[in-house]
């Protein structure tokens, strides 16, 4: 029996986007085909991938296997991927998108996102794919490229016009960058994907963005756990799953701490995309529908907001040492 799932309807296309999906960051290529196949079998219908995760080929293989075994139909899946920062220049966008479709082995994606509003120096696909990280191969320092977002977005709109990406959106944008985009866009972003958890609740951003008709997808719903090896801030923060407030709410509802953290988002119409290779956790992370956090729980969780951002490219420990423009 398919797991219970709730959906959000996207403005422009009327497409239904599942409120609970599965994230693909840090899944080793060797584990990835089986993991995505299991995730779909377990009931996940939204898969969040990205060029930079280095596993689109295997994500695509997992999807293909699930479809070929009749577990799901393509039209019942919602596949997301993201353009990496090295392909922001207008002439590089469509080739990058085509390469991603080819890697995934799909005819279309449901949502194509700008991964970060940070243009990095270009490396041709023929020289390196999956894309290099923040620093160009062979160089020792991060360098920008002068590629403005409005040109990148224009190319995204053209891809949306073809239907090869049914919806287009953004990630890691703040209110000001979205406001700027809304001044010139022909097609409004359908989705904003951002870091969101009880330590970084971003209530004004969530409220403002949702009122614009842009849906929000939360990443890192469990807080610091994903960033322990990347940022000092994450090491200093108490793990959210061990926090007394979260643990006591979980006990009260006979749920796990992870389910409380995920429920907190979906209850405000924010999509979640947890990842686990462990079958029990994979199932548990979908068990977030058909029950609710009450006002007392929400008030207690509101008290945890600390403005703690873990995926912060400006943090020196992130290792990219953002230079000044010359
Ligand atoms: P996550 O949800 O994958 O959780 C982090 C860790 O928690 C994982 O190591 C996992 O093993 C563990 N975990 C998962 N379920 C658990 C459970 N029930 N109990 C205990 N531990 C559990 O967090 P994430 O990877 O930071 O974010 C999820 C997804 O969001 C990613 O896979 C990726 O798709 C996306 N993401 C996007 C961006 C972006 O810049 N747009 C950044 C980070 C992540």
Image: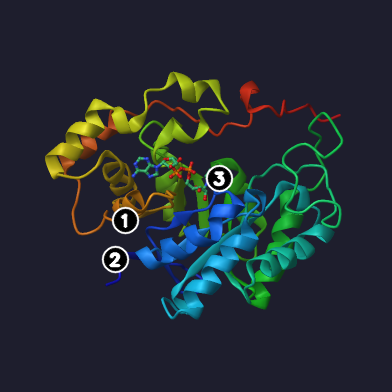
Q: CA distance from mark 2 to mark 3?
A: 25 Å
Q: Quadrant of residue 161?
A: bottom right
Q: CA distance from mark 1 to mark 3?
A: 19 Å
Crowdedness near tag 2: few (<14), some (14–19) or many (≥20) residues, C-alpha within 10 Å? few
Task: Please tell me which of labels 1 and 3 falls first in the chain.
Answer: 3
Residue 210 lies, with reference to residue 223, above or below; the image says below
In the image, is 204 to the left or to the right of 280? right
Task: Please tell me which of labels 1 and 2 falls first in the chain.
Answer: 2
- The residue where tag 3 is placed is 26
Q: Residue at x 42, y 58 (%)?
A: 21
Q: Is mark 3 within 8 Å of ligand 1?
A: yes
Place of residue 133 in the rendered image (x, y in percent of width and height, measured from the top left): 72, 41
Q: Give the quadrant of the N terminus.
A: bottom left
Badge 2 element? loop
Residue 283 got which mark? Answer: 1
Place of residue 229 in the rendered image (x, y in percent of width and height, measured from the top left): 55, 28
Residue 270 got which mark? Answer: none
Badge 1 element? helix
Residue 21 lies, with reference to residue 174, above or below; the image says below
Question: Extreme left residue here?
Answer: 252
Asked if residue 43 can be seen in this view, the reply is no
Q: Of circles 1 and 2, which is in front?
A: 1
Residue 3 got which mark? Answer: 2
**Count of numbered labels shown in the rendering:** 3
36 vs 77, nearest the viewer: 36
Q: Are dots 1 and 2 in contact, CB under 8 Å?
A: yes
Q: CA distance from mark 1 to mark 2?
A: 9 Å
């Amino acid at each position: 029996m398919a797991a219970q799932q709730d959906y959000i309807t996207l403005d422009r296309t009327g497409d239904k986007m599942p409120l609970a999906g599965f994230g693909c960051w840090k899944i080793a290529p060797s584990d990835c085909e089986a993991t995505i196949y299991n995730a779909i079998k377990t009931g996940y219908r939204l898969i969040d991938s990205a060029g930079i995760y280095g596993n689109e080929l295997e994500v695509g293989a997992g999807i293909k296997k699930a479809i070929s075994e009749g577990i799901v139909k393509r039209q019942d899946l919602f596949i997301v991927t993201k353009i990496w920062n090295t392909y922001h220049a207008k002439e590089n966008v469509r080739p990058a998108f085509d390469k991603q479709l080819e890697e995934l082995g799909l005819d279309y994606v449901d949502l194509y996102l700008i991964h970060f509003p940070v243009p990095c120096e270009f490396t041709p696909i023929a020289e390196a794919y999956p894309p290099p990280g923040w620093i160009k191969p062979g160089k020792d320092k991060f360098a920008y490229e002068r590629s403005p977002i409005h040109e990148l977005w224009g190319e995204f709109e053209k891809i949306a016009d073809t239907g090869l990406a049914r919806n287009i959106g953004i990630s890691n944008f703040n209110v000001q960058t979205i406001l700027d985009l809304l001044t010139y866009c022909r097609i409004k972003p359908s989705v904003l994907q951002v870091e969101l958890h009880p330590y970084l609740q971003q209530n004004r951003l969530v409220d403002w963005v949702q009122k614009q008709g842009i849906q929000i997808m939360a990443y890192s719903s469990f807080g610091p756990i994903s960033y322990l090896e990347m940022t000092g801030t994450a090491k200093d923060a108490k793990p959210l799953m061990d926090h007394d407030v979260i643990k006591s709410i979980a006990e009260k509802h006979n749920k796990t701490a992870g389910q409380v953290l995920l429920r907190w988002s979906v209850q405000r119409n924010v999509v979640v995309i947890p990842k686990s290779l462990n079958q029990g956790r994979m199932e548990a992370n979908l068990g977030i529908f058909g029950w609710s956090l009450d006002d007392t729980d929400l008030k207690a969780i509101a008290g945890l907001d600390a403005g703690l951002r873990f995926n912060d490219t400006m943090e020196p420990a992130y290792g990219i040492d953002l230079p000044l423009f010359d």
